[in-house]
Image: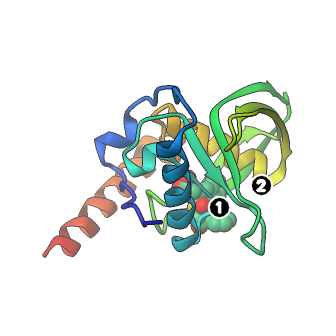
Amino acid sequence: MALIPILLYPDPRLHKVAKPVQAVDARIHRLIDDMLETMYDANGIGLAASQVDVHERLVVIDISQERDQPLVLINPEIVWASEEMHLNEEGCLSVPGIYDGVERASAIKASALDRSGQRRTIEADGVLAVCIQHEMDHLLGKVFVQYLSPLKRNRIKTKMLKLAREESR
Ligand code: K1U
Ligand code: ZN
């Protein structure tokens, strides 16, 4: 297994739209293992393939305290979303150190292939619902800061570019 570098906002590659996974084969199994290792190493609760510069519809999630309940979503689709919305504090491994409120559906049903290529339906609310919607946005090339005001987004962009410049010195 290997750690994969995570793209940092405002890297334009974060805005590419991911394509469906064509086959759940050995390459995808290796990518899943590497993404899980990368997510655990970064103390994240989710990671989308887009964040590691692989533009295919694959997401890994683990919201458990023990970090031992990985969830793998391949070609996920939201098949139902509640009308009820909820404002949640979100973070993103591609925008480290930034947290802000985003309004999303309180509960969802998603359909996806699991690691063995079996289709599953996932019913989610709370943190899991937030995380699935956040990760599926990544697959569409959308980063959570795009829900914030232009003023906040520009401040975040400036801060991230300054950090990147300092780190490259
Ligand atoms: O997509 C990502 O970058 C992962 C992201 C997932 C996420 C967290 C919180 C709300 C929505 C989506 C993270 O894991 S950010 C990491 C983090 O700081 C965090 C970890 C646990 C709970 C809350 C935030
Ligand atoms: Zn994110």
Residue 121 left/right relative to 87: right
* Callout 1 amino acid: Ile
Whether residue 90 appears in this view of the structure is no
Residue 158 left/right relative to 77: left
Q: Which label sits on residue 127?
A: 2
Q: Position of residue 23 (x, y in %)?
A: 54, 30
Disc 1 target residue:
45
* Callout 2 amino acid: Val
Secondary structure beneath dot 1 equals: loop
Q: Position of residue 81 (x, y in %)?
A: 80, 28
Is ligand 1 closer than 8 angstroms to the Cβ of mark 2? Answer: yes
Q: Position of residue 112 (x, y in %)?
A: 71, 32
Is ligand 1 closer than 8 angstroms to the Cβ of mark 1? Answer: yes
Disc 2 crowd, CA 10 A, few/some/many (<14, 14-19, 20+)? some
Report the label total. Answer: 2
Q: Is residue 74 above or below residue 101?
A: above
Residue at image position (44%, 59%) is 95
Quadrant of the image containing the C terminus = bottom left
Mark 1–mark 2 distance (CA, rounded to whole Å): 9 Å
Which callout, 1 or 2, points at the residue further toward the start of the chain? 1
The answer to whether mark 1 and mark 2 are in CB contact below 8 A is yes
